[in-house]
Every structure is written in structure tokens, then in C-alpha cells.
Image: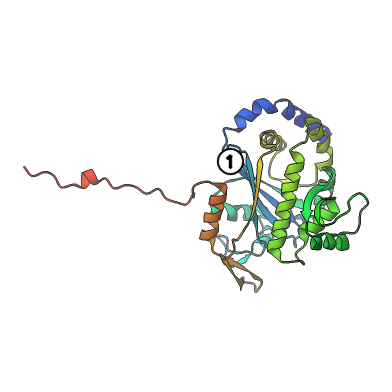
């Protein structure tokens, strides 16, 4: 019944997509947090960590989607906390993902409209549901995925553009053996770009058929109505430019330990804020407007 209701709601969204498109354009930009976790969080698995933290910025005015990936080893200190920790452990707190969202909102001044959390193992089914993703691989990456994920008939991997199924894509996204965590961030960004490219040609009927496959694969702060409103607006962004980048920027961090002795990255927050605002092409929300002095009122009165 739940899936049937979702399908009916999606059908209504598709039927009204064109009229809703004009309304959506009135919103310049919205931000959503995408979290790939190795567990569902404190309530189900207290050891959960967020292996992928990505801010998705939907720019309706410029027809652009920007994925900003945060290194999971960034050392952070939420405003109400005494100790520093790595950012990927914030979802272990009593408030779970709300702590992570609050931290990003406070540090970057960007309102987050909602979040989507998917257990990394769930990405296998999600990517399989859309028929896989096409990603350009290096020979080392192809060899690594073939070695660790196994060989699959119909999904041969080699250097160059390859089609990856869910298991292969998950292995590709989680790999940092070939380089480091920044390399893994880049691979996660490429996978998201490939997913968006795959969705760009989806038909309304295809979207309707996809609903049954993806329900229950993620957890979100959005209601059913809000999810379908977002899907309706997202139709405007089919074929949009996709930008992927990572934080922290090179030269804006140093290695150190957090309050609990875990090795991580101490980042120059001001420099990374400025970089993010440049990429998004938006003004710095922390920048105070300079007030021009009222020179006229400051002038001495004319002598009589």
C-alpha cells in the first residue's frame, strides 16, 4: 500500500511537472545533505560513521547541480562541544545527523533544506535499480574493482569508460588503497555525476517504475509530500551542468590529532568557506555589508 501511494503521488508530480517548473525557478538555490553511512546511526548501530558527507546544491537559476564532498577526517568542534572530533563521527551523537547538519549550517551559513542518509550497502541496490553507472576508470581502478568486487558477466571493466553495477560502484567509491581519502572523495563525486547523467534521460514512466525499487533504501528528513515536491522541481534540472569538488582545498589543512587522539585534518575554515562560495557563485553570507559614513552630517556647520 505504501509503495502504491508513493507511485500515485509520483504520477501526480509528473503530470504537473511543467507547471511546477516555472514555480521552482523562483527558488534560486537549495541545499541538501547526502550522507553515506556504514550503519544507520546511534538508534540502531551506535558505531555508525558517515563515510561520505556531500552537500548537494541545486541551482535552479543557473541550471546547475554542485556536489561538495567533505573529507571524513576533518577535525571539527561544534559550538556547544568541549572536545574536537572527526566530522564522520558526528552522527554518533545523541542527536545523530542533526548535529552534523547544525555544524555545517553554522560553519558555512547555508540553510540545509533536508537530508538523505543511505547505508553504503544500500547503494548496491540503488545503482542496480537505475541499471548501473558509466564511469571512466584508470587501469589501476579497473584492476582494483575486479580484484575486490569480483568479475560480473555483462559488466567487464577496463581502462576507459566502463559500465559498473552496484557492487562494482560501491567498491570503486570506497577505495582509498590506490591513493588516499581525497582520491576516494573524487571517486564518490564521479559516481554522483554518473548517477545524475543517468537520470537526465529518464522518462516519466521510467521514474514511476523506479519508485518501487528505491523506497526503503534511504532515510530522509523530508515527508512524502516534500520528497515529491523536490522530485518535481528536480525535473527542471534534467541535463543541468554538474560540478563536483572537495573540501578542504589543497594547502588549507594540516595533519594533527583530535581531542581523543585520532589523526585527522585541521582545516583553515575561512579559506574553505571562501572557496565554496566562489564555486557556488554566491556572496559570503558571513560578510557584513560595509556602511558608508554619513559624511554630510559629519561636516561642521557653516559659520554665520
Residue at the outermost right position: 153
Asked if one can make out residue 125 in the rendered structure from this viewpoint, the answer is yes
* Residue 248 placement, left or right of 299: right
- Residue 264 horizontal/vertical position (percent): 64, 69
Q: Which residue is mark 1?
A: 29
- Residue 155 horizontal/vertical position (percent): 88, 51
* Helix, strand or loop for disc 1: strand
- Picture quadrant of residue 146: bottom right
- Picture quadrant of residue 157: bottom right
* Residue 178 placement, left or right of 271: right
Q: Nearer the viewer, residue 226 or 279?
A: 279
- Residue 26 horizontal/vertical position (percent): 57, 32
Question: For the residue carrying disc 1, how many other residues have a C-alpha within 10 Å: few (<14), some (14-19), or many (20+)?
Answer: some
Residue at the outermost left position: 304
Quarter of the image with the C terminus is top left
Task: Using the image, determine if residue 133 lies above or below residue 13.
Answer: below
- Residue 70 horizontal/vertical position (percent): 64, 57
Amino acid at each position: 500500500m505504501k509503495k502504491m501511494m508513493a507511485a500515485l503521488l509520483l504520477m501526480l508530480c509528473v503530470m504537473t511537472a511543467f507547471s511546477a517548473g516555472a514555480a521552482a525557478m523562483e527558488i534560486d538555490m537549495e541545499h541538501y545533505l547526502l550522507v553515506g553511512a556504514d550503519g544507520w546511526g546511534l538508534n540502531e548501530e551506535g558505531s555508525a560513521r558517515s563515510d561520505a558527507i556531500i552537500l548537494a546544491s541545486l541551482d535552479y537559476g543557473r541550471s546547475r547541480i554542485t556536489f561538495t564532498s567533505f573529507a571524513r577526517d576533518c577535525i571539527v568542534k561544534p559550538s556547544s562541544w568541549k572536545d574536537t572530533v572527526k566530522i564522520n563521527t558526528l552522527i554518533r551523537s545523541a542527536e545523530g545527523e542533526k548535529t552534523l547538519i547544525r555544524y555545517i549550517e553554522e560553519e558555512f551559513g547555508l540553510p540545509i533544506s533536508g537530508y538523505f542518509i543511505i547505508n553504503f550497502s544500500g547503494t548496491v541496490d540503488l545503482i542496480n535499480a537505475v541499471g548501473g553507472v558509466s564511469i571512466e576508470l584508470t587501469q589501476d581502478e579497473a584492476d582494483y574493482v575486479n580484484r575486490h568486487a569480483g568479475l560480473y558477466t555483462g559488466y567487464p571493466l577496463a581502462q576507459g569508460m566502463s559500465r559498473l553495477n552496484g557492487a562494482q560502484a560501491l567498491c570503486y567509491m570506497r577505495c582509498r588503497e590506490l591513493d588516499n581519502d581525497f582520491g576516494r572523495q573524487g571517486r564518490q563525486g564521479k559516481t554522483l555525476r554518473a548517477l545524475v547523467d543517468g537520470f537526465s534521460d529518464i522518462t516519466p514512466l521510467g521514474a514511476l517504475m523506479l519508485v518501487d525499487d528505491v523506497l526503503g533504501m534511504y532515510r530522509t528528513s523530508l515527508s512524502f509530500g516534500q520528497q515529491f515536491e523536490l522530485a518535481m522541481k528536480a525535473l527542471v534540472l534534467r541535463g543541468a551542468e554538474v560540478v563536483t569538488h572537495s573540501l578542504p582545498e589543497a594547502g588549507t589543512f594540516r595533519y594533527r590529532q583530535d581531542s581523543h587522539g585520532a589523526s585527522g585534518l585541521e582545516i583553515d575554515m575561512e579559506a574553505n568557506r571562501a572557496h565554496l562560495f566562489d564555486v557556488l557563485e554566491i556572496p559570503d553570507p558571513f560578510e557584513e555589508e560595509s556602511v558608508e559614513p554619513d559624511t554630510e552630517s559629519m561636516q561642521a556647520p557653516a559659520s554665520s
